Amino acid sequence: MTLDDVRARDGADPLRACRDRFRLPDGLVYLDGNSLGALPKAAVARQREVVEREWGRSLIRSWNEHDWIGAPQRIGARIAPLIGAKPHEVIVADSVSVNLFKLITAAVALSPDRPVLLSEPGNFHTDLHVASGAAELVPDLRLETAPRDRIEAALGPDTNLLLLTHVHYKTGERFDMAGVTRAAKGAGALTLWDLSHSVGAVPLHLNRDGAELAVGCGYKYLNGGPGAPAFLYVAEHLQERLLPTLRGWMGHAAPFAFADDYVPAPGISRFLAGTPPMLSLLALESGVESFDGVDMDAAWAKSIALFDLFAALVEECCAGHGLECITPRDPALRGSHISYRHPHAFEICQALIAAEVIGDFRAPDVIRFGLTPLYLGYEDIWTAVERLADILETGRWRDPRFAVRGKVT
């Protein structure tokens, strides 16, 4: 593989035009879209319109005149095709952590005689933190974990709810959603999937795979902006059976009746709580619109090609420097990032950032590189590995400044 070959692949890339939908600094290789997506150009103009015209001129009338009030359902319906769901099964609200709490506490109430909330050790830590808090609040419920290769064996008559992240945040390992969901159903348990490292990169088919509950992040591959609202999914057949324990006026059947007693809204809308944050919500809408006309199978095919190129170049150019790939090589077993273990992963990551290649570090010893098909090119991969090889060969990562850790690592 030569640089000319790589450039030829970029020239033939059917998704190449999507790159023009984003603001990306010249000379920077951005490999952290799995943590914070790039800025859509459309979001800049849309935010100006929202602030100056809708908020600035229409003021409170915008809830009706510009349909602010319908944004959670409208944007949820736009996310639905990206996860293989029906439009009325998805709504945008709050954060992943809050949505996890909503769905866990509502779901476990359906089977109070089953005391186990099951997850895996090493799951994304907010999932485990929220799960442990929910277990402390729900009488007789306890959180248990089992290694991923023992999850199905751990399912049993005591299992109430299985909580898993579809694509592991650190290693990139991916569960077989259909198989695991089927096994949980066979044991009489519900399954709640965290799609935060999947949606917008990996093809998802929640309806086809029998998924019942899910949450997902708006600021990673969906490019919704820092701290963008999250979404939640509830399969149609469960919506009227689940009663939220975290209740707010926007989830009421008649929020502007101002009634004291809670009556849940029909369907997915009952999982709203407080007033939607319109600036960040509409920024997310711009991010989701970045997928207009994009075939997710084509995006996934490009992700596979980017991964294969990255892995091959690292093997060729960085051999002997202690990088260990911990992400499965089989595309069916992984998501859209590639991770390497190294005893000095943090320092190497910081040296890369100084060289205008932005990946990220995950404690204690992992560097992650996000492979975002909409705006990442093959030459970006070539440049990133070239700079990585130079940092390793010269030992530049040993500079003491690269060992200084900020609050965000």
Image: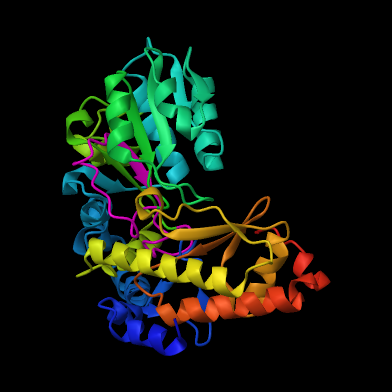
Task: Using the rendered view, name the quadrant where residue 16 is placed.
Answer: bottom left
Q: Residue furthest bottom?
A: 4
Q: Is residue 261 visible?
A: no
Front-most of residues 225 and 401: 401
Residue 243 as seen in the image, left or right of residue 363: left
Task: Using the rendered view, name the quadrant where residue 295 is placed.
Answer: bottom left
Image: 210 above or below 10: above
Residue 191: x and y in percent read: 34, 31
* Residue under the point 59% across and 75% down: 317
Residue 241: x and y in percent read: 23, 24
Screen quadrant of the N terminus: bottom left
Q: Is residue 204 visible?
A: yes
Front-most of residues 326 and 78: 326
| Residue stretch in magenta | 198-227
Residue 107: x and y in percent read: 34, 25
Task: Using the rendered view, name the quadrant where residue 316 is placed.
Answer: bottom right
* Residue under the point 41% across and 90% down: 4
Front-most of residues 258 and 249: 249
Number of marks in the image? 0
